[in-house]
Structures are given as structure tokens and as C-alpha cells.
Amino acid sequence: MAIVEVDAAISNLAGLCPKEGPRFQLTACRQSPRGYAWYELAVDGAAGEQAAIRNAHIVLRALERLAADVLRTDIRIVSGAEWLELARNLRRA
């Protein structure tokens, strides 16, 4: 669903994520640009597309807060930012 990027010094982003909330999997990518670590995000889509969109939004926002508040580093959504916009559109509907 998405790929996020953090400083390479953050070697265990998946292990730092909260365990409560939507079901998701965050897996380190095999290759990342030098100096960065990329992680692939997949959310549980068993409850349907709208639930998956909401869950992707929740997890991506939680990762942003984790990076800013706890890790004191930047996080960049390399791909998958469209899930944030889709979630906003669902709330308006």
C-alpha cells in the first residue's frame, strides 16, 4: 500500500510501531537509497476497500507521529500518499 523512508540509523521501525490499532505489516525493503531505510506498509484488507483506506491513513499518520515525537527524525512517504487523500474523501462522503 505504501513505502515510507526514514534515516538509516532507524534500523527497526517495524519493532517500534504500536501493536494496537489496525492490523498492518511493516517490512524493511531489501534496497533503499544510501543513508535511508525504506519500509513497505501493508494493511489488512479483509474488511473491504474503505476499511483498508482508513487503516492505511491511520497507520501512516501514526508513523509520522512516531518519527516526529519519539524518534526525532523525518519520515517521507515515498509512495502511497494517495491513501491519505482517499481517506479524507471518505470522511467527506
Image: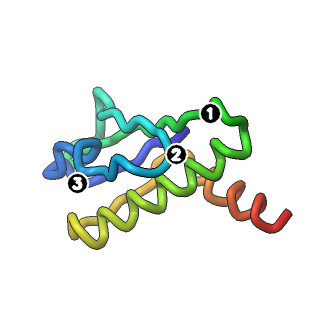
**Label 2, label 1: how many angstroms apart (C-alpha)?**
18 Å
Q: Looking at the picture, how far across and down is residue 71, in whole percent?
A: 21, 64
Q: Amino acid at mark 3?
A: Asp
**Label 3, label 2: how many angstroms apart (C-alpha)?**
16 Å
**Label 3, label 1: how many angstroms apart (C-alpha)?**
29 Å
User: Which residue sits at x=63%, y=52%?
Assistant: 54
Label 3 SS:
strand
Q: Residues within 10 Å of mark 1 (few under 14, many from 20)?
A: some
Question: Above or below — where is 23 with respect to 61?
Answer: above
- Look at discs 2 and 1 and give the one toward the viewer: 1
Q: Nearer the viewer, residue 37 or 88?
A: 88
Mark identifier at residue 7: 3
Label 2 SS:
strand
Q: Amino acid at mark 2?
A: Ser
State left or right for residue 74 relative to residue 76: left
**Mark 2 or mark 1: which comes first in sequence?**
1
**Mark 3 or mark 1: which comes first in sequence?**
3
Pick the quarter of the image with the C terminus. bottom right
User: Which residue sits at x=24%, y=66%?
Assistant: 73
Say whether marks 3 and 1 touch (CB < 8 Å).
no
Label 1 SS:
loop
Mark identifier at residue 45: 1
Mark identifier at residue 79: 2
Q: Looking at the picture, how far across and down is residue 22, in whole percent?
A: 50, 46
State left or right for residue 86 relative to residue 35: right
